[in-house]
Image (cartoon, grey):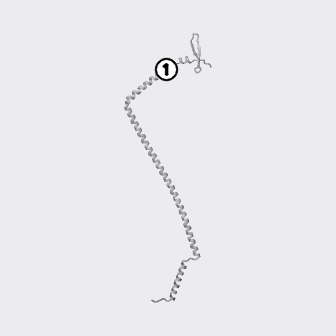
Amino acid sequence: MSAKDPFQILADELTLIRKDMDQLQRTSLDKKDAQALHKKLADGVDRMHRAASEVHQAIDNRLMTVTAYLKEETTKAAEKAARDAILKAHDESIDAARNLTQAAGEARREAWRYFGGFWVWLASMLAVGAVLGVLLAYAMETAKSALSVDDLVRYNCGRSWFGGQVVDQDDGSTFCAFWITE
């Protein structure tokens, strides 16, 4: 192995330093490049900030849309449930009314059978008719005698609501006279 000459070592070291300097020049920025890079980074951060607020606004809009949709669907579901409950209650009440009507009909038929049916009903109606006929005949006779014209004139002649004037005759009898003047 041959030992390197110190001059050769120095030349190799200078070559390496030159290469490092070239590489540093390529990777390091001057002021103009740094400002351009800063502007690009600032613009990127600004765009990211705007995009974040737009994303936030889009999320808010989506949430509001979903909320409105949920409210509408919830209202529809509640209305449907209420309508179904009302229809069910209506059907149940119709069924109950039908059952009560059927039970009342059965009770009426059973009572009809228990109390003798048609012949007992016919006899009771004839008896009621006979009682009403007797009462009507008695009332008519009583009214006829109470309201006869003879009695009406005898007891009411000369009264203000009936009119007329009691006139005495020579034989001691009286009569009720109405004077008509034209």
Residue sitting nearer the eye, 108 or 29: 29
Q: Quadrant of residue 94?
A: top left
Q: Is residue 115 above or below residue 55?
A: above
Q: Is residue 167 above or below residue 58?
A: above
- The residue located at (51%, 58%) in the rendering is 63
Residue highlighted by disc 1: 142
- The residue located at (39%, 35%) in the rendering is 107
Q: Left or right: where does residue 153 sit relative to residue 80?
A: right
Percent x, y of residue 120 = 38, 28
Residue sitting nearer the eye, 67 or 3: 3
Give the residue furthest to the right: 182
Q: Is residue 178 above or below residue 17?
A: above
Percent x, y of residue 170 = 58, 10
Residue sitting nearer the eye, 180 or 73: 73
Q: Left or right: where does residue 45 sit relative to residue 94?
A: right
SS type, badge 1: helix
Percent x, y of residue 45 = 55, 68
Give the residue furthest to the top: 171
Residue type (three-letter) at the residue carrying disc 1: Thr
Percent x, y of residue 161 = 58, 21
